[in-house]
Image (cartoon, rainbow, N blue to C red):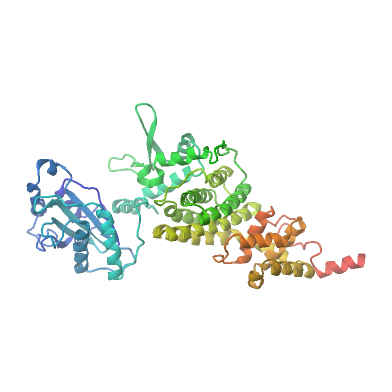
Amino acid sequence: MVPKIHKRGKRTIGLLYYLYGPGKAEEHVDPHLVASWDHAAPDPGRDGESTYKELQQLLDQPLALLTEAQRARPHVWHLSVRNGPTDRILSDEEWGDIARRMVSAAGIDDPDQGAGCRWVAVRHADDHIHILATLAREDGYRPDLDRDAVRVQAEARLLEQELGLRRLKPGDGTAAQRPTSAERHKAVRQGRERTAREELRETVRRAVAGAVSEDEFFGRLAAAGLLVKTRVAPSGGLLGYKVALPDDRNKDGEPVYYPGARLAPDLSLPRIRERWSADTVAQDGGSVQPLRPVPAAPAAARRDTATVAWQAVLVVEHGEDGLAAAHIAAAGEVLDALAKTSAAHTRRELHEAAWAFERASRSHIRAVRGHDRALRQAARDLVGGGPALGRGEDGASTAMAIDMLFFLVTAAAHWHARKGHSQQADAAQQAAEHLRSAYRAAAGHPLAVLHQRGRRLSRPLLLRQTAVLREAVPHLAEHVLTEEGWYALAATLAEAEAAGHDPGALLADAAGRRELGTAESVSDVLVWRLRRTAGLPADATGMPGTGRLGTTPFKGTTPDRERRERRRR
């Protein structure tokens, strides 16, 4: 159940005409009253002799008791209460009870005091009602509506439980503004999957990811095809901006602009500038170089992303709250950048992961910017490196990056849960599930190649890697040996050993530094951690002995080859 308090107005009759009218897309069906302040208000929807003017005059009568200055202030209070698409359809009696409890919770009408405001609740659809109230009490005072939005939200949580509706997470006021019903209906008419407000928010977030200046930010907005207007002070300084989709027009044919702050709290120009200013602020009193402008290759950018995501997990798990909040916010930039540059087979899930995590990137804990510089650089490199091809080293490094980001997003979910940020924790969990799906799509081929290499290891070499596994991680060994990914891990251990590393030490470090309980496959996670730590190519396809598709046996990996070598000796 979603209660929403709309902007206050001065024309009761205008709102009544809308509530009882056909709607902007003929969506209003059978408008009628379900409750009112005195249980006997006239209903123009069901009573043919009642008029809007009659109802308006009754609602506005208490205004005569106010002073002229009080009457000049907006006096029309408007609340809509909407259920979700999976909720059952409530009766008029149930909606009437909801209306009475909502006005009581808000402070509009308290039956115990007997001097509340006049109000009506109109239902013109199965899933929601509108409550209109005149902000003048019967005793000549205006109501105390301090924190009315918080109180109606709390009442909605109680009603969800009592009526058996889908229970929403309590919010903290940091969520992006929801699209209005008019915006949603307009999106349907225009054939859009999301409203203009939502499309703009996503586009602006991607433009911010890794940007280092106003010029770069506004250049990215223009390149994305948005219409941009800026607000300039008399001194010439830039105060703010607003954006519009070229094909989103109002009834007069003019573009519909949205200020950055109306898209999301962290997309106002002052909040965006906080990221840029912190990029060059030293945390230890020394000098800090700005984010480098030279773009990295897509594969290199993804490897670096995996590294900094791995390091960021530790900060989120054990750092101070301000630092953790900064790293979580910057993780949102990385997800936006990765989604923007993703290959076709991972694009949808990465877009959905970034979209879900947007809610998790903000809370009332103020981010201490500057310490998140490595993540912002990773976002910048991803954008600068351009779109990924999705195959070879490029595709394998994408799987590596997604794997590490999954653990960072999961750590963010746990952090929010500990802080009581239920909406953010839920959003981070949703993002993690989309990352799981994206990982499966990205990791399938490179892990299959490693799996083939592992199965072709000679028996002595495979036994040696099994012994390394049991010695390095005895608590995980038997579980890993039953996983399909064990052969890919064995091949990686052999490759690390051939490169001069101690495979046991690498494996113990990889398994011990972060939790593995949320991993679908422990073997897969260890493969990417080892390859990143040891500096091994993410993709084994082109490695010596694998052939183009990993079909040629690695030297010394089959019994036949071993017999031939013995005959030569």
**Residue 509 x %, y %:** 65, 60
Quarter of the image that includes the C terminus: bottom right
The residue positioned 63% from the left and 55% from the top of the image is 396
Q: How many numbered markers are drawn? A: 0
Quarter of the image that includes the N terminus: bottom left
Which residue is nearer to you in this view: 150 or 55? 150
**Residue 429 x %, y %:** 46, 61
Farthest top residue in view: 235
Image position of 557 with respect to 303: above or below: below
**Residue 231 x %, y %:** 36, 33
Quarter where residue 225 is shown: top left
108 left or right of 293 in image: left
529 left or right of 40 in image: right
Which residue is nearer to you in this view: 281 or 383? 281
The residue positioned 65% from the left and 67% from the top of the image is 485
Q: Is residue 523 visible?
A: yes
**Residue 436 x %, y %:** 53, 62
Q: Is residue 446 visible?
A: no
Which residue is nearer to you in this view: 505 or 444? 505
The residue positioned 43% from the left and 61% from the top of the image is 426
